[in-house]
Image: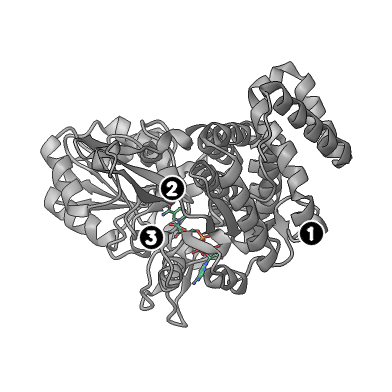
């Protein structure tokens, strides 16, 4: 039977279906659609909200299957990892089906806006929960990830065209991604990873560092609510309320998780790389900085203090040890003292080591290396503490707001060899550039993470960059410039050195797919 319908008939049918749908829908969703339709300031996000209206109602049958995070009271936060995985898996299927690039971008704009609005609250929560770093620097980090993490503009399609037709290579999503986050940038990494992961059409399930789980649950709830308010599906970002190594194993073993991303120390990276799944590993660093005899010493001093003291040296990119050519060492140290650093003498340093370091009695590997033969580890109690807290413990009254303690040491000193993550900064004098480079490469321990150099000699800069082969190499600026803070280029909280993706962004979380229109595209066979 053939039915003839006009455009008008079709419109009538659509209208009556939509009316029926609205009549059946839950009060909140009806209000949401009605409010958004009457609010002309939100006209740009109307299409995405229309999709949600249909989706919410189509979801009535399937909602019984979707795990609910209601028992934790926080959107996207689940009691069981299995439920967090299932919910994010279903969310991604829906996201991919119904949300296109423009709509993803609207969701990302909503994430950026909510982070900027809550940046002080987030910084305070993280500071109070982890007791690490500096509040004002955490505000800056939230601002950085909200404004400089790339969105969908990061995705590109390559095309080949010619007599034989057209071939495109597009960046497609993996699906559900499992991400592990560190205590040093907990919410910042979630925001940064989520923007990239969602921009590329994926969803994410998180195993966060247990010492930051409350702040992480808060930000997951905040981001999910912003996504839903922008018309997106629920549970695009999920986590388990109480993360453990067992809950990480559930992620690793779930066939629904197609890619793993880990930001943390070498133990984490090793675990993920052993999983049998594709893994992006962002591991530890121990960034050396070299100052040579041609450098602008005042600028070098200011930059080193800025980078090494930021968030009390917690960042993996932060300057962790300095190699300075002997002929300019005194002048550089003078400039550092002039710009607020405090020099510890031998006795004070020894006293500081007695509480800020722990002997490695059990021959364990910790920190920036898998080497279990190290003599010392850093004491967790003193990681990320203010320079003034160290001074107070040492009984030293210093003038002004000291942000960085400096000390002159030999190359073998634990503060050179360990990733201290404290505002205690070791300085090693060297006789020439060759020695500086040799020692800096050794101190970096092959992490190939970040290195910094202050020099006006291009040959010197090139020589060091080639020898150290780090993912980030910063010239004549603080390490922060390497992640777009006072430097050009986008930011990341996940610098994947070990697995080679480098400064991760949306495109990192994609699979390449080739789509071919062959035979000239038009040839009719027959
Ligand atoms: P961490 O390695 O102790 O923990 C990171 C995450 O991995 C946490 O969620 C933790 O629960 C988990 N984890 C730890 N050991 C594990 C193991 N053996 N198996 C599985 N999971 C494990 O690191 P942290 O103290 O949270 O963060 C600081 C470290 O992270 C530093 O070494 C720093 O250099 C590094 N880091 C690297 C980057 C980067 O982009 N490359 C960024 C931030 C931090």
320 and 5: which is toward the camera: 5
- How far apart marks 3 and 1 lie (CA) works out to 55 Å
Identify the mark nearer the N-term, 1 or 2: 1
Mark 2 sits on what residue? 172
Give the residue furthest to the bottom.
362
Where does the image place residue 268, in percent across and percent down from the top left? 47, 67
Disc 3 vs disc 1: which is toward the camera?
1
Q: Residues within 10 Å of mark 2 (few under 14, many from 20)?
A: some
Kindly state the secondary structure of the residue where label 2 is placed.
strand
**Residue at 67% over, 31% down:** 117
Q: Is residue 516 visible?
A: yes
Mark 1 sits on what residue? 64
Tell me the quarter of the image containing the N terminus: top right
Where does the image place residue 448, in percent across and percent down from the top left? 29, 56
Mark 3 sits on what residue? 415
Kindly state the secondary structure of the residue where label 3 is placed.
helix
Q: In which quarter of the view is residue 90 placed?
A: bottom right
**Residue at 59% over, 31% down:** 106
């Amino acid at each position: 039977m053939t039915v003839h319908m006009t455009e008008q008939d079709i419109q009538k049918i659509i209208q009556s279906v939509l009316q029926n749908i609205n009549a059946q829908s839950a009060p909140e969703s009806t209000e949401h659609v009605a409010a958004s339709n009457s609010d002309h300031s939100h006209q740009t996000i109307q299409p995405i909200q229309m999709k949600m209206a249909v989706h919410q109602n189509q979801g009535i049958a399937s909602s019984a299957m979707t795990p609910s995070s209601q028992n934790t009271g926080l959107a996207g936060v689940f009691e069981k990892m299995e439920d967090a995985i299932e919910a994010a898996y279903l969310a991604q299927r829906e996201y991919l089906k119904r949300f296109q690039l423009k709509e993803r971008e609207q969701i990302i704009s909503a994430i950026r806006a909510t982070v900027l609005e809550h940046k002080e609250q987030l910084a305070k929560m993280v500071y109070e929960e982890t007791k690490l770093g500096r509040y004002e620097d955490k505000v800056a980090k939230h601002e950085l990830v909200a404004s400089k993490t790339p969105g969908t503009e990061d995705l590109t399609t390559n095309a080949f065209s010619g007599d034989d037709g057209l071939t495109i290579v597009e960046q497609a999503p993996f699906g559900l991604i499992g991400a592990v986050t560190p205590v040093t940038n907990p919410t910042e990494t979630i925001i940064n990873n989520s923007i990239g992961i969602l921009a590329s059409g994926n969803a994410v399930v998180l195993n966060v560092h247990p010492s930051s789980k409350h702040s992480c649950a808060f930000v997951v709830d905040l981001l999910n609510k912003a996504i839903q308010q922008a018309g997106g599906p629920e549970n695009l970002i999920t986590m388990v309320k109480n993360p453990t190594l067992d809950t990480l194993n559930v992620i690793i073993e779930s066939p629904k998780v197609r890619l793993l991303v880990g930001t943390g120390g070498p133990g984490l990276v090793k675990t993920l790389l052993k999983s049998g799944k594709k893994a992006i590993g962002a591991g530890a660093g121990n960034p050396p900085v070299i100052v040579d005899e041609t450098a602008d010493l005042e600028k070098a001093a200011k930059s080193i203090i800025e980078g090494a003291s930021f968030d009390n040296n917690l960042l993996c990119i932060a300057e962790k040890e300095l190699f300075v050519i002997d002929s300019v060492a005194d002048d550089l140290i003078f400039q550092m003292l002039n710009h607020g650093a405090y020099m510890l003498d031998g006795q004070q340093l020894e006293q500081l080591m007695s509480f800020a370091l722990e002997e490695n009695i059990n021959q364990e590997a910790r920190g920036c290396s898998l080497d279990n033969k190290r003599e010392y580890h850093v004491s967790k109690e003193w990681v990320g503490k203010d320079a003034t807290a160290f001074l107070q413990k040492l009984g030293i009254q210093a003038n002004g707001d000291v942000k960085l303690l400096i000390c002159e040491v030999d190359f073998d000193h634990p503060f050179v060899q360990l990733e201290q993550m404290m505002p205690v900064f070791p300085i090693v004098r060297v006789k020439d550039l060759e020695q500086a480079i040799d020692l800096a490469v050794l101190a970096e321990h092959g992490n190939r993470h970040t290195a910094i150099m202050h020099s006006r000699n291009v040959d010197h800069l090139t020589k060091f960059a080639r020898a150290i082969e780090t993912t980030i190499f910063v010239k004549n600026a603080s390490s922060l410039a390497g992640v777009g803070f006072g430097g050009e280029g986008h930011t990341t909280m996940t610098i994947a050195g070990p697995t080679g993706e480098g400064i991760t962004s949306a495109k990192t979380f994609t699979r390449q797919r080739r789509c071919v229109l062959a035979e000239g595209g038009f040839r009719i066979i027959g």
